[in-house]
């Protein structure tokens, strides 16, 4: 079998990589161990959240699919952090898990140029080449599968998730699984070690699922979604969807006492699990041990879908034995009669050190091999999907003979994440937070299309109709901004008795009025209906925030200009750091490993001092 591209794995990274390559016209085969688990939400039944929701909208602006799938399958929608500034607000949606998985699979089945194939990849096929565009002498030529299929391609995208040498733990029980009762992908991790890759182990976990009928919801707080629901996808209106509530309860002293009593049976504390777990999503055992003074911990009870009675216990991730799980779950108010349908478990798996990748997510060891998702040490559906999309785009760019698409830290959360991974590496599951982004005021979820749509259109991932819609939006936004500058508050409007204008004089333009935190664009549209005519509410929100934060954004732009001066000074990939005089020993060793593509990236490498950056600039000036 011969294709232009191979994608290994059909999780969220594999979905986006496969769709991007196929939509850009390349014959692509996606290989997965089980076609029925394409797009499976392995853990929490939700998409989005703080910083993560921003990335979902960035994925959509770049032509990806995640936003459209969750729009079609959500069962609750909320904007998180409404009480705080827009830079740290984000959309989050509860997903109908079975529907999400089915929609993802069906979307891929309908995509031209994309073939789906059930098998397990056990080896990579490579050849020695001399190509100045590559960092190395080896280039990928295809893959070998468990059933002996040799499949060739010019580019390969590797997205193995938690399956590469995966092992699950439930107390004393362990099995070679990537998810419970789903076999691990064996062989490839060991082969990558033999090929010289820096392969490590990581751990993550998931809580038990219980039957809805066994809950006593009268003992819990009910949590409804927002009344106002807007789509993650910029390309369309929100389709009608059912809305289901979630529930909140708390652990108790009794819960914590039960967990402490069973700690000796936890593989996490007995030393059987070697990999590092997620710092920001610890198991309930971790929480009880690390926060002994906490009287209680949140438990969010979330529905897994419309046509399933399974409920997800968010906050109770565990690797304790099943009898211990049942005992401590039934100590939680509202869960006294809980029936466990699936136990919680920990999973340990192989990952590859992402500092061995270029900013295009291409391996420095094997040319034309792109790596994305949890294989790079990240945690979360959104982080995986964003990497998969960028890996797919850059694999296609390699086939086109074009330079890669690299997003910098000032233009996307996706850029922040990839730069963190390839520059700093990670030894624990990486999760995106707003605090990681220095320019987060400009990286709001509402303006992702403004930042990134044109890049995806240039790549070829937006249709002519989508481009035309975006142009119409841009024209209308400019018209509204112009109207805000020209329209002024009349003396009659100021004296109308409206409380908002009580201390105002006539003559102030609407743009100036809108900078007042108490004034909204909707207030101004009451006086000037032309502001909201033929305008989507999402457009108006974007305009309002741009106006209110214009001063901050202009100051941010000055920082970005300084930042980009360093980013635009490229470093030749063939630079021999041993021959650069004046570098500190630590900087020399780190630069040889990371091989930064710009002075900006070099300055963020741990161990590189400002004096080393000055030496690099002098060296580049000489060249």
Image (spheres, helix red, strand yellow):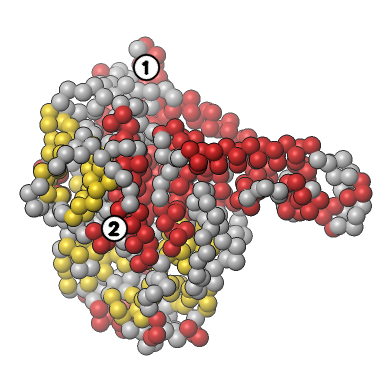
Circle 2/circle 1 CB separation < 8 Å: no
**How many other residues sit within 10 Å of disc 2, few (<14), some (14-19) or many (≥20)?**
many
Q: Residue 430 appears at what percent x and percent y?
A: 35, 51
For marks 2 and 1, the one nearer the N-term is 2
Q: Secondary structure at mark 2?
A: loop
Q: CA separation, marks 2 and 1?
A: 47 Å
Front disc: 2 or 1? 2
**Quadrant housing the N terminus:** top left
Q: Is residue 149 visible?
A: yes
Label 1 element class: helix
56 or 266, nearer to the observer: 56
**Residue 224 lies in quadrant:** bottom right
Label placed on residue 396: none
Q: Is residue 339 above or below residue 15?
A: below
Where residue 554 sits: x, y (%)? 63, 35
- In the image, taking residue 394 as reference, residue 59 lies left or right, namely right
**Would residue 580 be found to the left or right of residue 521 on screen?**
left
Residue located at (49% from left, 35% from top): 454
Q: Where does label 1 land, which residue?
A: 620
| Image height of 167 relative to 465, above or below | below
Residue in the image at 38% along x and 23% along y: 570
Q: Which residue is mark 2?
A: 38
**Residue in the image at 23% along x and 37% along y:** 4
Location of residue 295 in the rendering, given as x and y in whole percent from the top left corner: 45, 76
Q: Position of residue 302 (x, y in %)?
A: 43, 72
């Amino acid at each position: 079998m011969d294709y232009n591209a191979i994608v290994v794995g059909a999780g969220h990274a594999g979905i986006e990589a496969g769709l991007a390559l196929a939509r850009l016209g390349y014959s692509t085969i996606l290989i997965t161990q089980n076609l029925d688990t394409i797009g499976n939400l392995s853990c929490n039944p939700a998409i989005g959240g703080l910083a993560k929701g921003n990335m979902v909208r960035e994925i959509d602006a770049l032509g990806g699919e995640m936003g459209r799938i969750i729009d079609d399958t959500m069962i609750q929608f909320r904007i998180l952090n409404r009480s705080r500034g827009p830079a740290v607000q984000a959309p989050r949606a509860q997903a109908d898990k079975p529907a999400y998985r089915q929609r993802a699979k069906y979307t891929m089945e309908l995509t031209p140029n994309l073939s789906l194939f059930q098998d397990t990849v056990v080896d990579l096929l490579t050849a020695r080449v001399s190509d100045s565009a590559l960092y190395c002498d080896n280039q990928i030529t295809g893959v070998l599968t468990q059933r002996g299929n040799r499949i060739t391609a010019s580019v390969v995208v590797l997205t193995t998730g938690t399956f590469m040498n995966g092992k699950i733990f439930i107390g004393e029980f362990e099995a070679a699984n990537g998810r419970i009762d789903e076999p691990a992908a064996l062989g490839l991790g060991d082969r990558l070690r033999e090929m010289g890759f820096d392969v490590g182990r990581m751990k993550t976990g998931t809580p038990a699922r219980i039957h809805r009928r066994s809950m006593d919801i009268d003992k819990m707080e009910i949590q409804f979604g927002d009344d106002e629901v807007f789509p993650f996808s910029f390309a369309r209106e929100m389709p009608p969807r059912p809305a289901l509530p979630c529930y909140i309860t708390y652990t108790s002293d009794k819960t914590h006492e039960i967990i402490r009593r069973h700690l000796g049976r936890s593989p996490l504390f007995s030393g059987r699990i070697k990999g590092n777990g997620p710092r920001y999503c610890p198991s309930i055992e971790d929480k009880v041990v690390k926060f002994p003074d906490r009287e209680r911990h949140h438990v969010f009870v979330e529905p897994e879908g419309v046509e399933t009675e399974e409920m997800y216990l968010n906050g109770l991730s565990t690797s304790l034995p099943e009898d211990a799980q049942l005992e401590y779950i039934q100590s939680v108010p509202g869960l006294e009669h809980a029936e466990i349908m699936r136990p919680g478990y920990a999973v340990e798996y192989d990952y590859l050190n992402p500092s061995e990748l270029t900013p295009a997510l291409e391996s420095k060891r094997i040319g034309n091999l792109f790596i994305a998702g949890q294989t790079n040490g990240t945690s979360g559906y959104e982080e995986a999907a964003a990497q998969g999309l960028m890996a797919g785009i850059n694999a296609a760019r390699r086939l086109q003979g074009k330079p890669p698409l690299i997003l910098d830290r000032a233009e996307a959360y996706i850029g922040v994440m990839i730069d963190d991974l390839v520059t700093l590496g990670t030894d624990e599951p990486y999760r995106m937070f707003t605090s990681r982004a220095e320019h987060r005021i400009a990286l709001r979820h509402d303006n992702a299309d403004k930042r990134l749509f044109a890049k995806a259109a240039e790549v070829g991932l937006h249709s002519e109709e989508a481009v035309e819609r975006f142009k119409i939006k841009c024209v209308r936004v400019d018209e509204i901004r112009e109207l805000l500058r020209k329209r002024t508050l009349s003396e009659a409007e100021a004296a109308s008795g409206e409380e908002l204008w009580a201390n105002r004089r006539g003559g102030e333009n609407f743009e100036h009025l809108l900078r007042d935190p108490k004034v909204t664009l909707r207030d101004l549209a009451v006086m000037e209906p032309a502001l909201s005519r033929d305008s989507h509410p999402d457009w108006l929100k974007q305009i309002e925030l741009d106006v209110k934060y214009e001063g901050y954004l202009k100051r941010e732009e000055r920082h970005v200009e300084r930042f980009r001066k360093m980013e635009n000074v490229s470093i030749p990939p063939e630079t021999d750091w041993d021959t650069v005089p004046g570098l500190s020993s630590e900087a020399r060793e780190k630069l040889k490993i990371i091989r930064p593509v710009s002075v900006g990236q070099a300055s963020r490498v741990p161990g590189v001092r400002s004096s080393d950056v000055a030496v690099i600039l002098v060296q580049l000036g000489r060249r």
